[in-house]
Image (tube, rainbow, N blue to C red):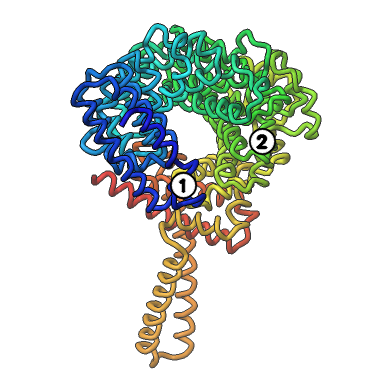
């Protein structure tokens, strides 16, 4: 058959006219078989032409390639063997250019949306007949569409292509010097194919290890930036490969992270979403921006990042420039860059050395203080990233006092009120706790009323929101933390708020505290009539604590810490703080409420000091009473012949003796507790195995101090309970020490 005859056959029996007996009805299995039969003669002609190397085969292939665009012929091509014949030609190689091109067209069209034909191509690795010619630049406009039609939505073909190293061949095409000038329409298709390959297991290992750097470099070229589609295609597939940790290592080792930053910058600053009319394209840009942020977080979190990129390197310096706002006047664009900088530098600051340098040498916190203090800055992503970064900066002890401005009412404390963003509230109060930990100056800061903080002139860059302080009737930020604890439904937030309160109380009852104050804090407090103002450099004195406690309801948060049972280490932390507080008269009076106004708190104290729950204690008491009853009965039987008067006298004498014995017992046990020379102790990492022992000793100190300091104000039954627990606790402490010495 000639090429013309083949074209006529395909036209007459295609989907536009259908088989003679089918009319306008949809194709059926019968019509498929009929078309397959019609192609038998075509296949015979093709074989004959190939055997003589006739150029007429080129024209027949062209006609068949045109016909393959008709969906009705795709399956019959496979059934009749036409598809397999041309696959075999490609495998043989050295075809004339025209024949090669039309063979590719036929294969690509026949496989489009047709899994049966795709399966034929995958069988016995026939796909390699196509992929082995990918490097031929002259065939690029045909090879790429064919490969895409074969691979899209068909995983077996994707797996085979990945295993055969197709991505390396495609990368070679992208490196052609004229790729954007001559083959620009095919760049997105190459990227789409790579995006299919990267989803396969083992593709990251099979790919060229430089693939991420190459793709990012291409995305950063002016030609790619001029076309949003090209830029998105290249950047998106680069990020897909960058999800692999080994390729992250390679990007860092090759010193190519600046390429990632350049692409990130263009995606946020160079691409103007407002000027794009296509909604789908806008969605792609937004997705790319999100993926870039995740990729930057992964790369900067890689262990090798901080090792390769010291703070003096161009990459961290670029991030610091973003943090400070750069040269762009668009605040929205700046916030995107600043969020990214917070995330990346936050990963760098996991090292104490880097964290200290970022605060003390690079002043990385200063632009964040200014931004967080701006009431117009409400972007939750940025605020959360900033708080996370600042939490790392707040860990080294030397940084804490330099971060004090974060605790000004208009700064981090303003975030406590954002009830619609509970995750941000948690981040803010968690940051606050770290700033308060072991830093008396910061405790002073958060306990100082806003109007008094306004007198402080050392933080001029925080003045943008000072007028807001009147909104809360000049309450301290400590009040705001307590209020957040009271209204939050999120347990992690309540927990962090309660820990903040415990940290404040711990500082107020630590001695000597005045030595821990920074020079600024000491001089400032001398001139302020704050509830915490030191008198004669004794900070804080009992009068100041009383004033603080009169305006801050700390009881509920403290009670929460000792009654929750999800985090034993935090309960232990609370017992330590309560023991400290109990060693002053005002603190002892304060802790009575959390302990004895709530049954759960009282039960917690009993259990921690005695090591027994209420049911165990009740059972022991009942057992003791039964024993005493038996002894008394036996004694009565032995004495039943004695006179009534003598029995009465003996009974009175016994009761008097027992009363004296009990009094002596209380005195002796109290003395024993004192002789133990116990001091409030905090459980450290090495002591976690002995947490219950330390907790019991702290609880014993607490009970001992309460009996000593508030005995006259306690109801008799509560005093009796404390005395009993003191006895049990002292015995337990002595036993624990003996056991410890024995070990």
In this view, 76 is above or below 216 = below
Q: Quadrant of the C terminus?
A: top left
Q: Work out which quarter of the rendered image holds the N terminus and state it.
A: top left
Q: Residue at x 44, y 36 (%)?
A: 11
For residue 511, say whether it is visible.
Answer: no
Residue drawn at x 35%, y 13% as measured from the top left: 138
Secondary-structure class at tag 2: helix
348 horizontally vs 520: left or right: left
For residue 536, the mark is none
Reading the image, the residue beneath label 2 is 416
Q: Position of residue 454 (x, y in %)?
A: 75, 20
- The image quarter containing residue 295 is top left
**Above or below 353: residue 621:** below
Front residue of 150 and 582: 150
Percent of width and height locating residue 261:
49, 15
**Residue lying furthest bottom in this view?**
641
Looking at the picture, tell me which residue is in the foreground, 270 or 482: 270
Left or right of 646, for residue 414: right
Residue drawn at the location 80% of the way across and 34% of the way down: 473
Query: Which class describes the residues within 10 Å of circle 2: few (<14), some (14-19), or many (20+)?
Result: many
Q: Mark 1: few, some, or many residues within 10 Å (few <14, many ≥20)?
A: few
Pick whichever of labels 1 and 2 is earlier in the sequence. Answer: 2
Mark 1 vs mark 2: in front: 2
Marks counted in the figure total: 2
278 relative to 545, above or below:
above
Q: Position of residue 41 (x, y in %)?
A: 28, 38
Query: Which is more toward the observer, 504 or 581?
Result: 504
Find disc 1 in the rendering and name its residue. 567
Query: Image height check: is 213 above or below 381?
Result: above
Q: Are marks 1 and 2 in contact (CB under 8 Å)?
A: no
Label 1's element? Answer: loop
Residue 729 location in percent, x, y? 43, 54
């Amino acid at each position: 058959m000639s090429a013309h005859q083949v074209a006529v056959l395909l036209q007459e029996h295609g989907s536009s006219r259908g088989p003679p007996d089918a009319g306008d009805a949809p194709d059926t299995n019968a019509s498929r078989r009929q078309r397959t039969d019609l192609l038998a003669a075509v296949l015979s002609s093709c074989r004959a032409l190939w055997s003589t190397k006739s150029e007429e085969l080129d024209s027949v292939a062209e006609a068949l390639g045109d016909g393959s665009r008709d969906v009705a012929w795709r399956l019959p091509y496979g059934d009749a063997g036409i598809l397999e014949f041309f696959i075999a030609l490609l495998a043989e190689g050295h075809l004339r250019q025209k024949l090669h091109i039309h063979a590719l067209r036929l294969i690509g069209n026949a496989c489009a949306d047709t899994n049966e034909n795709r399966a034929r191509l995958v069988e016995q690795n026939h796909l390699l007949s196509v992929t082995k010619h990918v490097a031929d630049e002259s065939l690029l406009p045909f090879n790429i569409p064919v490969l895409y039609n074969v691979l899209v939505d068909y995983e077996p073909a994707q797996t085979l292509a990945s295993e055969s190293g197709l991505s390396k061949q495609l990368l070679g095409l992208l490196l052609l010097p004229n790729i954007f000038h001559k083959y620009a329409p095919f760049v997105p298709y190459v990227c789409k194919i790579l995006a299919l390959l990267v989803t396969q297991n083992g593709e990251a290992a099979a790919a060229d290890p430089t693939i991420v750097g190459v793709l990012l470099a291409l995305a950063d070229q002016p030609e790619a930036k001029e076309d949003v589609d090209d830029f998105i295609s290249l950047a998106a597939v680069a990020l897909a490969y960058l999800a692999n940790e080994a390729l992250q290592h390679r990007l860092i080792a090759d010193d190519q992270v600046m390429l990632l930053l350049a692409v990130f910058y263009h995606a946020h600053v160079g691409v103007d979403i407002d000027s794009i009319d296509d909604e789908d394209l806008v969605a792609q840009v937004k997705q790319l921006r999100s993926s870039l942020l995740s990729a930057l977080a992964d790369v900067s979190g890689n262990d090798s990042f901080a090792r390769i990129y010291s703070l003096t390197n161009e990459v961290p310096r670029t991030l610091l420039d973003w943090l400070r706002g750069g040269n762009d006047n668009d605040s929205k664009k700046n916030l995107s860059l600043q969020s990214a900088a917070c995330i990346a530098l936050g990963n760098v600051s996991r090292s104490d050395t880097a964290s200290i340098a970022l605060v003390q040498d690079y002043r990385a916190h200063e632009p964040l203080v200014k931004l967080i203090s701006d009431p117009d800055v409400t972007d939750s992503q940025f605020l959360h990233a900033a708080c996370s970064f600042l939490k790392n900066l707040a860990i080294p002890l030397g940084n804490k006092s330099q971060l004090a401005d974060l605790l000004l009412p208009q700064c981090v404390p303003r975030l406590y009120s954002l009830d619609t963003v509970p995750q941000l509230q948690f981040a803010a109060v968690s940051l606050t706790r770290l700033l308060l930990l072991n830093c008396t100056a910061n405790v002073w800061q958060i306990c100082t009323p806003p109007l008094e903080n306004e007198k402080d002139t050392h933080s001029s860059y925080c003045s943008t929101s000072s007028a807001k302080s009147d909104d809360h009737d000049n309450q301290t930020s400590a009040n705001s933390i307590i209020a957040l604890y009271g209204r939050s439904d999120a347990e992690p937030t309540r927990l962090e708020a309660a820990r903040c309160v415990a940290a404040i109380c711990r500082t107020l009852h630590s001695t000597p505290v005045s030595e821990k104050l920074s020079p600024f804090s000491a001089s400032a407090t001398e001139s302020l009539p704050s509830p915490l103002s030191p008198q004669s450099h004794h900070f804080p004195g009992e009068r100041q604590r009383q004033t603080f406690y009169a305006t801050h309801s700390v009881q509920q948060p403290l009670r929460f810490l000792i009654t929750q049972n999800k985090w034993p280490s935090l309960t232990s932390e609370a017992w330590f703080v309560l023991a400290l507080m109990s060693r002053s008269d005002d603190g002892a009076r304060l802790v009575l409420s959390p302990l004895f106004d709530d049954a759960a708190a009282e039960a917690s104290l009993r259990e921690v000091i005695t090591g027994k729950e209420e049911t165990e204690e009740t059972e022991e008491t009942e057992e003791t009473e039964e024993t005493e009853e038996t002894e008394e009965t036996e004694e009565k039987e032995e004495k039943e012949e004695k006179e009534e008067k003598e029995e009465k006298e003996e009974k009175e004498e016994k009761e008097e003796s027992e009363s004296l014995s009990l009094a002596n017992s209380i005195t002796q046990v109290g003395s024993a507790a004192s002789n133990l020379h116990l001091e409030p102790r905090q459980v450290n990492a090495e002591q976690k195995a002995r947490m219950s022992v330390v907790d019991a000793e702290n609880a014993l100190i607490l009970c001992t101090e309460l009996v000593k300091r508030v005995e006259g104000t306690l109801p008799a039954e509560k005093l009796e309970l404390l005395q009993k627990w003191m006895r049990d606790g002292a015995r337990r402490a002595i036993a624990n020490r003996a056991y410890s010495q024995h070990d």
